[in-house]
Image (spheres, helix red, strand yellow):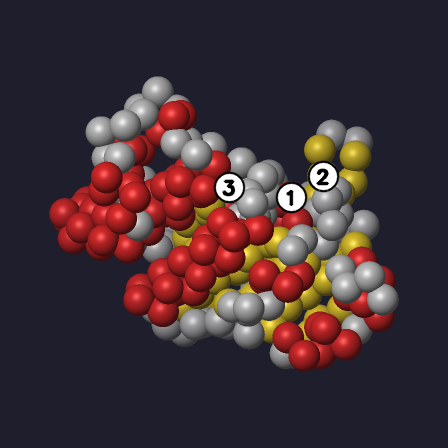
Amino acid sequence: MVRDVEAGYGAVRVLHGVSMEVNEGETVALLGTNGNGKSTLLKCIMGIVRPDAGEIVLEEDGRRTSLVGRSPEEIVGLGIALVPEGRRLFPKLTVEENLLLGAYRREARAEIAGNLRFCLDAFPVLGERRRQLAGSLSGGEQQMLALARAVMSSPRILLVDEPSVGLAPILVSRVIAKIRELKESHHLTVLMAEQNFNQATKIADRGYIIVHGQIEFEGHSTRELAEHELVKKYYLGV
């Protein structure tokens, strides 16, 4: 749960009273064009950017845990993983080494072998290139590796930031399909920041539209989103 979050960088305010919820087992799309605060919100949830005001709370099994003020390491330890925009891989390490680094979380270490098998089965191209340097992979392969690395931490909540950026349309479809596959196989809760409306709504249960750092609309279904004037204006060219 995110409530009334204000955040930015130095004197530049990016988020203005953002509130939203993601319920267990949902896939929620955070829609917005570049520069509207999607990535900043995900960084706030992960502890990379500290909010100036507001609450970010993980509610699980009847317990409420505030994420504000916690380090990214602590938040990962709570079962939240981020697939960052631009992948942020270790280009001079191999595919397998990148995957193993994803299992740094203490709770994931006992499951390394099983998670590694799953990732290489789910992403066969990574199995074929497991000894190859991550920096030599194509853009689509790197996005697959970034997703698989997040799964190696055995998360319960997956944050995905702009998975379509820099990919050809056919690769975007494959990546989005893989996110849905991972969500279903690992019973994940997913919050996906994306500007590609048509791709995001293929797997989202519902979504929010963020404009200039404020939530302008909450759609309780993808149909509600598609029918909203902001979506018609910014995404559908109507």
Looking at the image, which residue is at 27% across and 48% down? 124
Mark 2 residue element: strand
Q: For marks 2 and 1, give the CA distance.
A: 8 Å
**Is the residue 65 above or below the residue 226 in the image?**
above
**x, y (%) of residue 126?**
29, 41
**Is the residue 90 above or below the residue 76 in the image?**
above
Looking at the image, which residue is at 40% across and 58% down? 178
Task: Find residue 229 and report its image quarter.
Answer: bottom right
**x, y (%) of residue 117?**
18, 50
Identify residue type, mark 2.
Answer: Gly
Provide the residue designation for mark 2.
8
Q: Is residue 73 left or right of residue 67?
A: left
Provide the residue designation for mark 1.
40
Instruction: Tell us which disc is closer to us: 2 or 3.
Output: 3
Q: Is residue 75 visible?
A: no
Provide the residue designation for mark 3.
84
**x, y (%) of residue 14?**
75, 43
